[in-house]
Image (cartoon, rainbow, N blue to C red):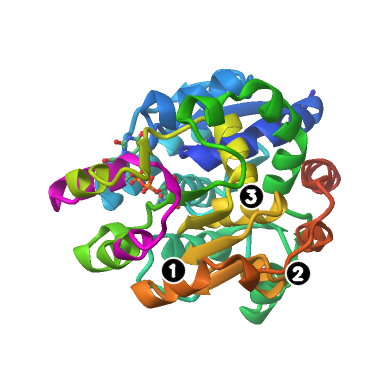
Amino acid sequence: MRKKIAIIIGVRPHFVKLATLYPFINDEFEVIIIHTGQHFDFEMSKVFFQELEICAPDYQLGIGSGIHTEQVGTGIIEIGRILRDHRPSCVIVFGDANSSLAGAVAAAKLGIPVAHIEAGARNFDLQMPEEINRLIIDSISSLYFCPTDVALESLKRRGLDKNIFVTGDLLLDSVIKNINSARSHSDILQRLGVSSKQYYLLTIHRAENTGGPENIREIIDALYEIDEKIVFPIHPRTKNFLQEIGLIEEIQAKKNFIIVPPVSYFDILVLLENSKVVLSDSNGIQREAFFLNTPCVILRDRTEYMETVEAGGAILTSVEKKGIVQSVKLENFKATLSDRSVFGNGQAAQKITSILRQVL
Ligand code: UD1
């Protein structure tokens, strides 16, 4: 009989990683997919299942994006009930979202081994909700799948030294696997009326940039200095916040801003590949831009993935107007495609599956 593995998903980037991992894991194990429902809008969830042909989750918890304590608390209770019934050999969680924390705590409390994908990625800022999640998940995991050597070192510095594997980054696998389909299926450039390398791509969703008016004002003021089109797929949290502080109309009035709802995975890959420079506070977007050889200005003080900065593909700017304006200049960047090998060779999914086969 095949061993059971449960995979916890909840937010947009999890769906992309699941799509890449699933075919391999499903060949070896009986897989149970539990979707917490943290992301629930069509554009934030279902479109990924359709486009990437992911099978429907076995459990849809519908927990939603409430306040963090409720997301995590309800998640632990609901996921715990399912795990108690199924007793899988292992529970896989991705990254650092509240859904991942809930899944890891529920599993650990039931004595089920937790396998953490993207283990060891840290930025040492405990003000950040995701950093708290990462710290706890890594403290209670049994298997660590690190995207890079830097992540491995950060675990070792914490005194962790068992069952740590550098597998490469599933996001690199995903980009390699999907970029050709994205190029042939997505018509996003035509739909938005933009041409390759003639626009900037902007994404913002982090709590630090959407929790008070200061950071967002600096970012937007810097962008007003750019005299080219700026494509801005807007995360629901950011949209709500900009509406709350009355900034959305001001931005919409600028002719060069193209504000659109969240876009699908194929669309974002095409937008990333063709943009002149990406500006983002997402560590996923930062890595995907790097894999596609597009320069990225990181709209944060810190990043979990300094590898992209050290390779010359990204610039970490503190969130103030002057630094951002200075950073977007193309001559500041120097990455070449071959640099992406610090994130593996695009076979993280195979490696993770083969390690699970050996250790479980
Ligand atoms: C979460 C993760 C973050 C990840 C991001 C990917 C945590 C702590 N953070 O942040 O690590 O980078 O997902 O996008 O888990 N909302 C909707 N519809 C949706 C989803 C969200 O309206 O489908 C709104 C809700 O008002 C919610 C807000 O967006 O309050 C924030 O959503 P939430 O799920 O709490 O976190 P993210 O900011 O998406």
Ligand 1 resides in the quarter of the picture at top left
| Crowd rating for badge 1 (residues with CA inside 10 Å; few <14, some 14–19, many 20+) | many
| Mark 1 CB lies closer than 8 A to ligand 1 | no
State the CA–CA distance, disc 2 to disc 1: 23 Å
Disc 3 residue type (three-letter): Glu
Per the image, label 3 sits on a secondary structure element best described as helix
Q: Earlier in the sequence, mark 2 or mark 1?
A: 2
Disc 2 residue type (three-letter): Asp
Image x and y of residue 209, in percent: 32, 61
> Which residue corresponds to mark 2?
149
> Which residue corresponds to mark 1?
300
Which region shows up in magenta?
A: 221-247
Image x and y of residue 73, in percent: 32, 47
> Which residue corresponds to mark 3?
288
Residue appearing at x 49%, y 47% in the figure: 100
Residue 194 drawn above or below residue 169: above
